[in-house]
Image (cartoon, coloured by chain):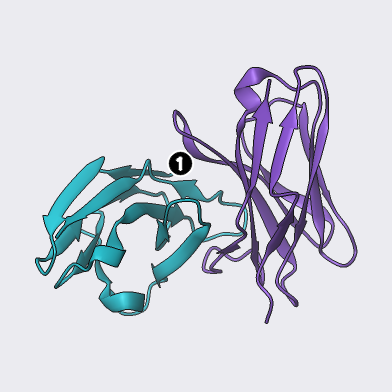
Amino acid sequence: AQSVTQLDSHVSVSEGTPVLLRCNYSSSYSPSLFWYVQHPNKGLQLLLKYTSAATLVKGINGFEAEFKKSETSFHLTKPSAHMSDAAEYFCVVRGGTSYDKVIFGPGTSLSVIP
Amino acid sequence: KAGVTQTPRYLIKTRGQQVTLSCSPISGHRSVSWYQQTPGQGLQFLFEYFSETQRNKGNFPGRFSGRQFSNSRSEMNVSTLELGDSALYLCASSLGTSGRAEQYFGPGTRLTVL
């Protein structure tokens, strides 16, 4: 069985400061992990994905995430927050087979203070 | 390349009615998944289709059904609508059903049940 936990329902940072959004997962198989962003009244956009290659994954808009198997974590980071980063962020896990369902975390709402 | 399109974008129905939502995937994508997004339950997986076959199904009642056509376009149907069916319904397409395949989301259909 798979599951995903996003440890913070809401994160608030000042513009120009680092962003850390935490995600822990549980999976019976070697999972694929994704981060998606959803801006208000818009669809979901893929930020980055991990699929058993490099453990440090770089995505769009300066975001990156590190896969840590020992900690079952896949935290999302960005060195410097921008106002346009304010959105809802979802961590997603899927197992290694095509029969594994896609499981979304509950989401973390990021606020950026000017 | 055109993105995932969903029609209609907004729908208002009354309890007991039925509704059909449509999704056109990105050209070349053969897998289509459907999700329900509500403030209380977050993003929940409904079902996944690949080459006109349902590959996966979430934990929703039988009132929720779907199908996929030979051109990969997909429809989902909800019969006997309930107030709790009010939600944003998202469609996502991907090249295949591999756990590594990234999904591309449409803007969603906002369903309101009165």
**On the image, which quarter does residue B57 sit in?**
top right
> In the rendered image of this protein, does residue B15 appear above or below residue B109?
above
- Residue A13 at least partly seen: yes
Q: Residue at x 14, y 73 (%)?
A: A79
Between B19 and B103, the one lying in front of the other is B19
Q: Secondary structure at mark 1?
A: loop
Q: Residues within 10 Å of mark 1 (few under 14, many from 20)?
A: few
**On the image, which quarter does residue B98 sit in?**
bottom right
Q: Residue at x 35, y 45 (%)?
A: A107
Rendering coords of residue B62 (x, y %)? 76, 27
Output the letter for the chain in purple.
Answer: B
Between A46 and A43, the one lying in front of the other is A43
Q: Is residue A36 left or right of residue B78?
A: left
Disc 1 marks a residue whose amino acid type is: Ala
Between B61 and B92, the one lying in front of the other is B92
Q: Residue at x 76, y 21 (%)?
A: B14
Which residue is at the far right?
B70
> In the rendered image of this protein, does residue B38 appear above or below residue B100?
above
Between B75 and A94, the one lying in front of the other is B75
> In the rendered image of this protein, does residue A11 appear above or below residue B4?
above
Rendering coords of residue A29 (x, y %)? 43, 55
**On the image, which quarter does residue B6 sit in?**
bottom right
Rendering coords of residue A50 (x, y %)? 38, 70
The hue of chain A in the figure is cyan
Residue position marked by numbered label 1 in the rendering = A1
